[in-house]
Amino acid sequence: MKRNLPLKVAAIKTRKRRKIEQAVRPTPSNPAKRSSERRTVRLDDLQWKEVSMPDRLDDFEGFFGLEEIEEVDVFRDGATGKISFQTSKPAKDTQRQVDVEDANGTQHGGSQENAGEKFDDDEWSGFSEEEEEVKEERPQEPELPRPSTSPSGQVKLKAKQKRGKKSGEPLPMEGAFDILTDEALDVSETDEVDVSAWGDLGLSGETLSSLSKLKFSQPTPIQASAIPEILAGHDVIGKASTGSGKTLAFGIPILESFLASRLKPSGQRPPLALIVSPTRELAHQLTAHLTALCSSNTFDGPSIATITGGLSVQKQRRLLTNADVVIGTPGRLWEVISMGQGLIKSFRQIRFLVVDEADRLLSEGHYKEMEEILNILERFDEEDEEDEGPEPTIPEVQRQTLVFSATFHKGLQQKLAGKGNKGGDLMNKQESMEYLLKKLRFREEKPKLIDVNPTHQMASGLKEGLIECAGTEKDLYLYALLLFHSKKRSLIFTNSISAVRRLSPFLQNLNLPALPLHSQMPQKARLRSVERFTAQPGSILVATDVAARGLDIPGVQLIVHYHLPRAADTYVHRSGRTARAEASGTSILICAPEEVAGVRRLVAKVHAQSKSDTKLKKTAYFIRSLDIDRRIVSRLKPRAILSKRLADAVIAKEKKHKEDEWLREAAEDLGVNYDSETFEAEAPGRRGRGSGRKKKEKEAGAITKSEMQALRAELKGLLSQRVNVGVSERYLTRGGVDVDALLNGTGNGEFLGIVDSLGFDEV
Ligand SMILES: Nc1ncnc2c1ncn2[C@@H]1O[C@H](COP(=O)(O)OP(=O)(O)OP(=O)(O)O)[C@@H](O)[C@H]1O
């Protein structure tokens, strides 16, 4: 059970953080009291005591609270396998009981496995109590399937019934730990999932039962092609469009290898696999996907360590000691692994090196850190050199190298704008192979290149379009677009952190549920934004390209490129956050007039590239403009202006505050007095680059508190009114538009014009 704990960490789904500090087990030396006054209780009914924590939480990595309980006996009924808890302690107050009841008045129960999850989440996830509300909304884990393995290794799940329903009687501890009991296994309710379509891949019963639980009835094309090659011991380069299941294409063979390795004598083993990811969010998500793959409860899965920046190095190093699978970002991985010879040696014995989003990790500008890792895996240490004599030969590579991405591109650094549009070309098959052979040391001379969809770069369910507007009106058009697509989970991409900082409050002021995500946010806040975005339907994530690759957030329906992608691969990956796993979705670029021609070429290039590989006749792809009634959009302008003024003022004040703090500290160090007004009055006026921006910032920051209040009140007034669109020649509207109703999902978006000419109404 303990060994599994790190796996659960990844669930990013924290519940109440509790620990049974002293669950008294009935042992001979500590016999449990079974006096008549003891009663069977639910854990949630007890008065848990909060354990005090130090104020500084930096090193606790999200461990925000600990509660303990004493004098509770844990019993497992030998006949039924049921687990129960007994105590003589009084029950907690009624309020507390209400907290753990759902809308139907039933108790939220967690399995014993889930109790483990709580510990693990506490290890790193960093969600505070205020997030409990979101977490409580999480759908309950599906009940545990019990696979029956046929001689062919195929697994079918039995249809199950709920215990309570069957007997019609309330069960002791119903809901809390049912999932552990044998009885529960037999009768819990779940759909029957036939996984016979996986039969040809020769997977173990354990893996099949997990796939069955995940309801993955058949492999995706990349899985069907890559898994047998990896299982046969080959190096593999896998290319398949975004959202096509590449994670399990390498995850399943790693699990198979782990399951096979259990037969060998145990002991201190080196990690089996190292998976490198370009971003922290993706690393945690990979952990989550592999964890889910091992969650059928029919076997103990591998222990997974997630090694990313933003979390304690010491803790991560400890995690590595027992890890079977290590997943991380290159910088932190290198930092942690290179801390000691012991780890370096054990990492040289890994059996699988996975480079996810390989073109990104191996591209100029990002390769350095990845190269450090590769060096660690390749390099001899001095001891080895002595053994081998003065000229050491390079040791034979024992590990399989698995490389996956949706794109392989060249010239990542070349910018699209103003540079002859050279940037962002995608590589054809031969070029990608040459490129990867140069960067990585494969075991085989020719790794298997599997490209499952050479004819199209983009997901099949994706619709693409652009909106043309003045560069200064992008905020307004973004607002209009989001109103039209209200209640749709949307991801807005920008090219700068400052744009994320500005757009998030701009949209929030307009009552849109926007969340920020960029690399300068503290790690806990980053994870929180992703979790909220995942949990809240209709929410909006405003992000830099840190969210462009790999993130698999279900139900993202709209991608907006507020800033144009700098390269073709970025366009592919950003757009790939929607229309995943056969779903549909929309990707819209907001372009200034001078950007339109360049963007058309970029998108045409993405579509043409795939055709050139297959020698299909090239017909230039023409991305269509979204037809939007500009007069109607202009009616939204007063709101947008007010919201922008408010957002700018808050940002300018925050910035000024930070600068003041910094200057005050510097002045204190120098032993002089600092007064911001005198300082500014005496500072020489700056001219030149950036002075206009400075001036604007100063003006924005000079707004007084009461002016801010007045602006807020004015905006509130506007937001409560209907947008009077008058009578449009083209789109007859009656009376006006209730934007609040639109936000509630009950309005009619037609006031924004014929946007369905592209079929976007189905999004
Ligand atoms: N065999 C399957 N059947 C159904 N769904 C699957 C299957 N395999 C994976 N999925 C689901 O498909 C979604 C996308 O998978 P994944 O994140 O691995 O895509 P990807 O190809 O790595 O995408 P990207 O290129 O954006 O990183 C996930 O939600 C995953 O759970």
Image: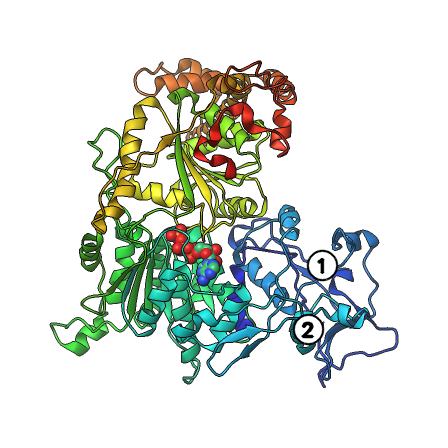
> Total label count?
2
Q: Residue furthest left?
A: 391
Work out how far the residue at label 2 is from the one at label 1, CA to CA, in angstroms: 19 Å
Please tell me in which quarter of the rendered image ligand 1 is found: bottom left
The image shows residue 760, relative to residue 375, as above or below, that is: above
Which tag, 2 or 1, sits closer to the chain's start? 1
Type of amino acid under label 1: His
The image shows residue 124, relative to residue 365, as above or below, that is: below
Q: Residues within 10 Å of mark 1 (few under 14, many from 20)?
A: some
Q: Whole-percent x and y of residue 653?
A: 51, 24
Question: Can residue 342 be seen from the camera position used here?
Answer: no
In the image, taking residue 13 as reference, residue 109 lies left or right, namely: right
Q: Residues within 10 Å of mark 2 (few under 14, many from 20)?
A: many
Nearest the camera: 175 or 679?
Answer: 175
The image shows residue 719, relative to residue 165, as above or below, that is: above
Determine if the C-beta at disc 2 is less than 8 A from ligand 1.
no
Q: Which mark is residue 108?
A: 1
Nearer the observer: mark 2 or 1; the answer is 2
In the image, taking residue 33 as reference, residue 239 lies left or right, namely: left
In the image, taking residue 286 as reference, residue 61 lies left or right, namely: right
Judging by the rendered image, the residue that carries numbered circle 2 is 187
